[in-house]
Amino acid sequence: MKSTLLPVQILLSIFSPPLRQRFVDNAIWEKDFPEMRWTMSPEDKRECHQRFKDLRDPEAHRALIGLTLDQRLNRLGYPVQRINVTTEDGYILGLYRIPFSPKSPLVEGVVKKAVILQHGLLANGFALFGLGILLADSGFDVYIANSRGNSYSQGHINPDMTLDNWKYWDFSFHEMGIFDIPAVIETVTDITKQQSMYFVGISMGATLLAVMLAERPEYNPRIATAFLLGPSIYLGHTALYIQPFLNFYISNTLVAGRLDPEIETHLLFGSSPAHLCSNEKYACVTTSTKAYIHLLQLMKTNKFCQFNYGFGAINKLRYGRSSPPCYDMHNISSPLLVFWGANDVFAKPQDIAKMVSKIPKNALKECIKVDSKHFTHLDFAIAKDSYILVYKRIIDVMLNATYG
């Protein structure tokens, strides 16, 4: 049953004009930034292939089908601790800690550096499950975050804020950025006493970090180095098929302000989800309709701004102006490494170039084109060679404390 309390049809009217032409020669990006690439030596690739083989044993994976995040980690022999994190606005998030691994046990007097892993808008902590294991094996104290509204983070301190209450779903990625990420950081600091930590954000997970650093710049020193994988910040060149699908599903399947994960699976993988690997059954999860609408606004405007309520009067009440303010990327000072794929339909090279132009030069440390012409948006999470192409570089930078 559709909610009558949200003006969804009115809000969707904002998005009817077609997006701008998106096909621009990708060579422009490579020509302008030839030094911002990273490749691996043959020796590194051989080592990566062996590690990949150890981690991705088919028999071991079949035994993990249908398990939750903590069950899967336990089955593989990794300790896991669920920590309930309460945000400033009352949401209760599930944070999963891997304090050590069978390959990197606790050693008295040795402090493991903390790493936060943040999934994107359509996912939960499963999206960075593999990277979490690799980081734990490499000697890090790993914290897998889960944003409000997904299957691991559906609590609230107010008992009236249930999943059937549209008010529960009255959030976009803005609230995830200004409330969820700071709450996770403070929790990790309380546990580890570390004042700074590493951060890996995939897709909208990177967007959440950018929102926090822009809106709450006091958190910049708390990020030792951030790794942004396929960051969805500027979206003006995003594939054109996504907008009409989201328009249709948001307007026809709205339930209490949220979208069902089966819809998200259809959008991302097509009309035959049965063909998906059953090991990835948690790939898509529930989130708010408002977050999707905010995403569409970024696609339409190619600006990185706060949520547009569609009426100047409402915006004026919320922001003190008729249009929503844009996030000030100049407030970002944390060291950033950006990874992007040439075949990514969500984070197009042209939009990555625009994002790079907005980030202060002292903050952007590396902008790396993944060394595969077929690398797509989802490959950052599920590609068989993600360790070879992306994760190895992340781990090396952390182990060497290259930028902090």
Image (spheres, rainbow, N blue to C red):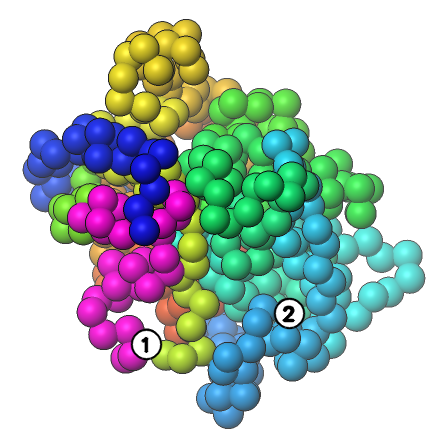
Q: Secondary structure at mark 2?
A: helix
Q: Which disc is residue 56 wearing?
A: none
Indicate the amino acid at tag 1: Leu
Q: Residue at x 71, y 67 (%)?
A: 80
Seen from the viewer's position, the closer of residues 89 and 301 is 89
What is the magenta range? Answer: 248-275
Disc 1 marks which residue? Answer: 276
Q: Position of residue 53 (x, y in %)?
A: 49, 83
Q: Estimate how packed mark 2 is, as few (under 14), some (14 to 19) or many (20 or more) residues with alpha carbons within 10 Å.
A: some
* Disc on res. 70: 2
Quarter of the image for residue 99 reads bottom right
Magenta span includes 274: yes
Q: Main SS of the magenta segment?
A: helix
The residue positioned farthest toward the bottom in the image shown: 59
Q: Residue at x 45, y 67 (%)?
A: 282
Give me the C-alpha separation between circle 2 and circle 1. 22 Å
Residue at the outermost right position: 108
Q: Measuring 9% from the left and 36% from the top, which residue is drawn there?
A: 18
Query: Could you tell me which residue is drawn at 23 percent across and 74 percent down?
Result: 272
Residue closer to the observer: 48 or 305: 305
Which comes sooner in the sequence, label 2 or label 1?
2
Q: Secondary structure at mark 1?
A: loop
Residue 43 shows in the view? no
Type of the residue with mark 2: Asp
Q: Reply yes or no: does residue 238 show up in magenta.
A: no
User: In the image, residue 296 lies at what x, y percent?
Assistant: 26, 38
